[in-house]
Amino acid sequence: MYPSRFRYEAPRSLAEAIGLLQDGGDYAKVLAGGQSLVPLMKLRFASPELVVDINNVPGLDYHRADPDGTLRIGALCRHVDLERSDLLKTTQPTMASAAPLIADPIVRNRGTLVGSLCHADPQGDWASVVLALGGSVVARGPRGVRSIPLADFVTGPFQNVLDEDEIAVEAVIPAAQGTRSGGYLKLERRVGDFATVGVAVALETSGATVTRAGIALTGVGGSTIGATEAAAALTGRPLTGESIARAADLAAQVARPRTDHRGSAEYKRHMVRTFVVRLLNRTDAAVERAA
Ligand SMILES: Cc1cc2nc3c(=O)[nH]c(=O)nc-3n(C[C@H](O)[C@H](O)[C@H](O)COP(=O)(O)OP(=O)(O)OC[C@H]3O[C@@H](n4cnc5c(N)ncnc54)[C@H](O)[C@@H]3O)c2cc1C
């Protein structure tokens, strides 16, 4: 199907893009990688009157670490840039393990992490990863710049807190206070598919003690789920078989899966528990090696 008729603009600066969004009001949409927006427009689930393509805005395709270790990912940084990033491989284990699992190579060539956060698909992998890492989104609009923790950014399925005239300019991952470990596991029907179940685990440790933990779930509820009680069960103590089992149970309890053609709710909840145990056991081995 063809999309509804729309006006297309390709501004060359953020100021120009924000001005266009202001004029376009409710009926304008930002286009980044187009990997979610274009299919939605072709299905006519989205029919914006104005599409503001930000691909000609210079200086948004970066991902880099500040001197203190804070990671910044610009709005035009593609999934493939993160998949191939040595910076991620050496400093961000959870992100590095998720990047090759996003969709397929064609989608990864164009799609962006920031676009994925904005799209707020409950099956989007990056939102869980960024949530587990305690990340945020920086938005710019006519009233200035604001930073929004990811926990507050996604408000529901395909909904975020951005105003109509705001653009998400970057995602920010805070610097680790200890040694970072973790990973992402995804159950998919075939390679390149959306997650039936996804689990992100991000830990920081000092010696053998967990100083910060984040666990987030993909595809098992109406939006990305932060398993905060599960994470709290790990914090302030070394990882043990007991704490791992407790965290896995608590994570499975906050999952809200639905039975569908991909599996029963019970099966998906079981997979959440299994993935948490698997990721934490891996992490435990890494922490032991580092200690
Ligand atoms: C076949 C296929 C398989 C896929 N599989 C997966 C998968 O396994 N896992 C996964 O996580 N994703 C998957 N995706 C989605 C893909 O990762 C998209 O790239 C991502 O969801 C959106 O990023 P984008 O840059 O393409 O955003 P776009 O499609 O350009 O935009 C998506 C939405 O976000 C808004 N938006 C984008 N950027 C901004 C911004 N900077 N500021 C404000 N609003 C913005 C747009 O207005 C739109 O509403 C798949 C997509 C396809 C087509």
Image (tube, rainbow, N blue to C red):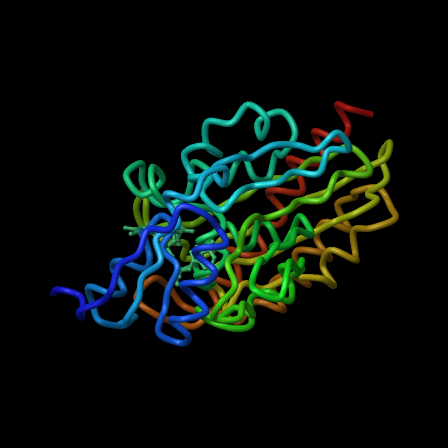
Ligand 1, image quadrant it occupies: bottom left
Q: Residue at x 60, y 55 (%)?
A: 137
Task: Point out residue 30 in the picture as x, y percentages from the top left corner.
Answer: 39, 59
Residue 58: x %, y % from top left: 45, 39
Asked whether the viewer can see residue 51, the reply is yes
Q: Quadrant of the C terminus?
A: top right
Is residue 126 or residue 271 the one in the foreground?
A: 126
User: For the N terminus, which image quadrant?
Assistant: bottom left
Question: Which residue occupies 61% across, 42% down?
Answer: 279
As displayed, is residue 66 above or below residue 278?
Answer: above
Q: Is residue 5 left or right of residue 46?
A: left
Nearer-the-camera pick, 167 or 270: 167
| x and y, in percent, of residue 90 in the image | 62, 25
Q: Residue at x 41, y 74 (%)?
A: 25
Q: Nearer the viewer, residue 273 or 12?
A: 12
Residue 260 placed where, x, y %? 34, 70
Where on the picture, by quarter, is residue 177?
top right
Left or right, 19 with respect to 230, comes to left
Asked whether residue 249 is in view, the answer is no
